[in-house]
Amino acid sequence: MSGDPADRDEDYRGAATIETGELSVTVAVRLSARFEPIEGRYRWAGRAAPDEVLTAQLRAGLREATVRIGAVAVRARLGEPDPWGGVRLTGTGRPPWHPAPAS
């Protein structure tokens, strides 16, 4: 893979670990990213599958989280659960399914 953003996969479906405070849950996620050339960075978003622990964390007021896929961990923001219990995830910068660029 080259360093060109156009060469990277824009979607991820699979397992992710979401860490909020001292709690950590592994759930299925569906995420997508787009590169914003004017900003020079990625914006990514998606949903985590319903999870009681994650929903309880949201209801307790937690909004900041870390999303970990494999060895890559990035900061994310949690949104309100949808009608089916899935939790919205949003982030800016390198998505968690992209490895760090080679130096």
Image (spheres, helix red, strand yellow):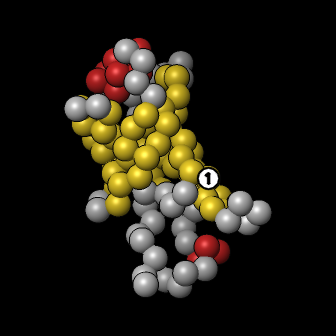
Q: Is residue 61 above or below residue 34?
A: above
- Name the one closer to the observer, 46 or 95: 95
Q: Residue at x 55, y 57 (%)?
A: 93
- Residue 23: x %, y % from top left: 23, 31
- Residue 86 visible? The answer is no
- Residue 88 visible? The answer is yes
Q: Which residue is the extreme one toward the right?
A: 38
- Residue 29: x %, y % from top left: 43, 44
Q: Is residue 74 above or below residue 48?
A: below
Q: Is residue 62 above or below residue 15?
A: above
Q: Residue at x 34, y 27 (%)?
A: 54
Q: Which residue is the extreme one toward the top?
A: 59
Q: Label 1 belongs to which residue? A: 43
- Residue 81: x %, y % from top left: 49, 23
Image quadrant holding the C terminus, namely bottom left
State left or right for residue 24 relative to residue 100: left
Determine the image quadrant of residue 63.
top left
Q: Residue at x 52, y 28 (%)?
A: 79
Mark 1 surroundings: few (<14), some (14-19) or many (≥20) residues within 10 A: some
Q: What secondary structure is found at the residue carrying circle 1?
A: strand
Residue kind at label 1, given as amino acid type: Arg
- Residue 44: x %, y % from top left: 57, 51
